[in-house]
Image (spheres, rainbow, N blue to C red):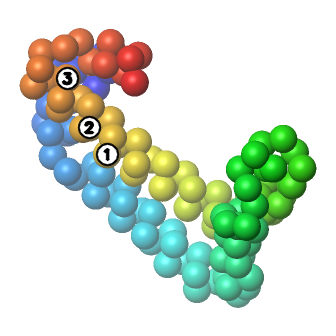
Amino acid sequence: MILAPRNPIVKTVMGSWFPILVATGIHFYVDYVGFTQPGALEEAAKFGAVFDPTIAPWDWANGAVTGPLVGFQSMLENPNFVTEEWAHVLAWDLFVGRWMWLDAVERDVPFLWACLLT
């Protein structure tokens, strides 16, 4: 999409929703497998430490509180979470990248410039 945005193969593959739906399907499947594993509720509870609304952003940023970082590091020890994050980022990046690509092709803007300016 970046190097050859008007290539017919790129237009065929990324012109459809198929790659995004595949990545989203992988994401949901990994979530399903992860939630059926023993200890899944304990792993899901770690999100509470990462997304604690009682911690002010400036306290986390200046290092006064380490809860979110420690919680996220703990989640990274779980292979199911790492795989889920990979699939999540892949699906999101394909979705946004496709959106940017379609917009750049429609406006006849070089896609590389569109990527660099965002």
Residue at 31 percent across and 19 percent down: it is 114
Label annotation for residue 98: 2
Under mark 2, the amino acid is Arg
Residue beneath the point at 32% across and 35% down: 97
Between residue 118 and residue 59, name the one nearer to us: 59
- Residue neighbourhood size for the residue with mark 2, other residues' Cα within 10 Å, grouped as few (<14), some (14–19), many (≥20): some
Q: Which mark is residue 95?
A: 1
**Alpha carbon of mark 3 to alpha carbon of mark 2: how far?**
10 Å
Tell me if label 3 and label 2 are in contact, CB under 8 Å: no
Residue type at mark 1: give it.
Phe
- Please say if 107 is above or below 83: above
> In the image, what residue type sits under mark 3?
Ala
Q: Quadrant of residue 41?
A: bottom right
3 versus 37 height, above or below: above
Do the numbered discs 1 and 3 sit on residues whose CB atoms are within 8 Å?
Answer: no
Mark toward the viewer: 3 or 2:
3
Q: Which of pointers 3 and 2 lies earlier in the amino acid sequence?
A: 2
